[in-house]
Amino acid sequence: MPLLPILRFPDPRLKKLAEPVRNIDENIRRLARDMAETMYEAPGIGLAATQVDVHKRVIVIDISETRDQLFTLINPEIVESDGQQVCEEGCLSVPGIYDKVERAENVVVRYLDLEGQERTIEADGLLAVCLQHEIDHLNGKVFVEHLSQLKQMRIKAKLAKQAKITA
Ligand code: ZN
């Protein structure tokens, strides 16, 4: 199965707002499978459909060391959040860049699973960070946009240089 190409910041398509999934059909299930494969291969701990240029509200996450605890969340929505934590984040769309971002410590996320069943997940720590990071993608936001303008300029310059070297 082909891996899906991942958009790189500051690609303007990363700014698109993803649409809710109305029908969990074979296309959505295939998308979720391809996204999971792409995430494992990258390797990463989370991937949003936006990053593979599909503007639907689908994310996959696996923060386990053993890489066998896949979560697929459709139409995820943060329904509660509290506390704060600062964690160093990275992103498959911003290769080689890591920086500290402040997020909620605890979140409750409501979503649909691949069978269309409504579920909620309560998360803290890394899983909470990852959920907020991926849901941000669906809303057109990349983690570096939480950083200062100066840092964002430096990151863009660094990525442009990388792109030139690999081109
Ligand atoms: Zn990301």
Image (tube, rainbow, N blue to C red):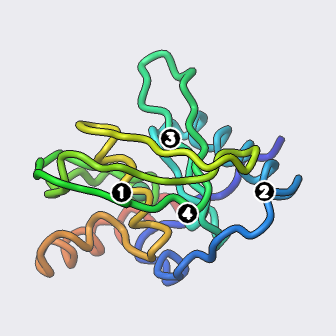
Give coordinates of residue 166: x percent, y percent.
50, 58
Cα gap from disc 2 to disc 3, whole angstroms: 16 Å
Residue type, mark 1 in image:
His
Q: Would you identify the image quadrant in which residue 143 lies? A: bottom left
- The residue indicated by pointer 3 is 61
Pointers 3 and 4 in contact (C-beta within 8 Å): no
Tell me what residue is drawn at x 51 percent, y 58 percent. 76
Residue 28 marker:
2
Tell me: is circle 4 under 8 Å from ligand 1.
yes
Q: On screen, 64 above or below 6? A: above
Tell me what residue is drawn at x 29 percent, y 50 percent. 107
Q: Would you identify the image quadrant in which residue 24 lies? A: bottom right
Tell me: is circle 1 under 8 Å from ligand 1.
yes
Cα gap from disc 2 to disc 4, whole angstroms: 15 Å
Q: Would you identify the image quadrant in which residue 13 lies? A: bottom right
- The residue indicated by pointer 4 is 51
> Dividing the image into 4 quarters, which one contains the N terminus?
top right
- The residue indicated by pointer 1 is 133
- Density class for disc 2 (Cα within 10 Å; few <14, some 14-19, many ≥20) is some
Q: Nearer the viewer, residue 139 or 149?
A: 139
- Which callout, 4 or 1, points at the residue further toward the start of the chain? 4
Cα gap from disc 3 to disc 4, whole angstroms: 13 Å
Tell me what residue is drawn at x 57 percent, y 32 percent. 70
Cα gap from disc 1 to disc 3, whole angstroms: 11 Å
Residue type, mark 2 in image:
Ile
- Density class for disc 4 (Cα within 10 Å; few <14, some 14-19, many ≥20) is many
- Which callout, 2 or 4, points at the residue further toward the start of the chain? 2
Asked which secondary structure carries label 1, the reply is helix
Choose mark 4 or mark 1, whichever is in front: 1
Choose mark 2 or mark 4, whichever is in front: 2
Residue type, mark 4 in image:
Gln
- Which callout, 2 or 3, points at the residue further toward the start of the chain? 2
